[in-house]
Amino acid sequence: MASALAIMAFMAVGCGSDRQGPSVAEEVHRLWHKGFEGVSIRQAREEVPLFESPEDLVMVFRKRRGSGRWVDWHINCNFYGTSLHVKGNQLRPVEVGGTLMGCYPWKYVKADEWLARFMEANPRFHFSGDRLSLTVGAKRVELRERGR
């Protein structure tokens, strides 16, 4: 009798097949061939002062024939990019490269360097609606899908 009640309780609750959002594979698929613009750049819940206008950040994820997955970004001064491996919900850049323009004021160069180091640290990603969050520890870059 007890086992019959346990089975009925399990069936009433469900067997866990009802997902509460997209799978990791679906989220990975959402990255490609899309552009995103910055919403906020935070470290430990505070805006990173190097970034006066996070909305100036533009990031584009692509699949390129022959060179695999790629991400390009630009904020303030220099242009950056890297080929990517994706493992679960983690971006794993192969080698970040960028232009080396001497930009003024100097904080623009520092902001570019901060963002390049952030991307080199294998950020995790997550979608919520049209928002894409990239996180490394207490650092978070929030982006919004362009054109939405």
Image (spheres, rainbow, N blue to C red):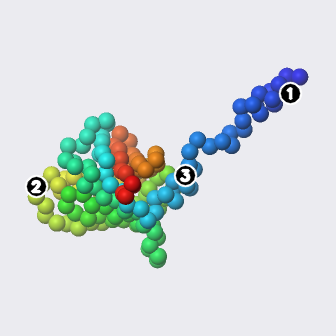
Q: Earlier in the sequence, mark 3 or mark 2?
A: 3
Q: Amino acid at mark 2?
A: Pro
Q: Earlier in the sequence, mark 3 or mark 1?
A: 1
Q: SS for tag 3?
A: helix
Give the camera-side residue of 93 and 28: 28
Q: Amino acid at mark 1?
A: Ala
Question: Where does the image place residue 98, in percent across and percent down from the top left?
Answer: 27, 66
Residue at 16% x, 66% y is 101
Q: Residues at badges 2 and 1 in contact (C-beta under 8 Å)?
A: no
Is residue 15 shown above or below 92?
above
Does residue 69 appear anywhere in the picture?
A: yes
Question: Where does the image place residue 7, in percent across and percent down from the top left?
Answer: 81, 30
Q: Residue furthest top?
A: 2
Category of crowding for the residue at label 3, using alpha-carbon neighbours closer than 10 angstroms: few (below 14), some (14–19), many (at least 20): some
Residue at 12% x, 54% y is 106
| Residue 4: numbered disc | 1
Residue at 86% x, 27% y is 4
Q: Which residue is mark 3?
A: 24
Answer with the quarter of the image where residue 20 lies: top right
| Residue 105: numbered disc | 2
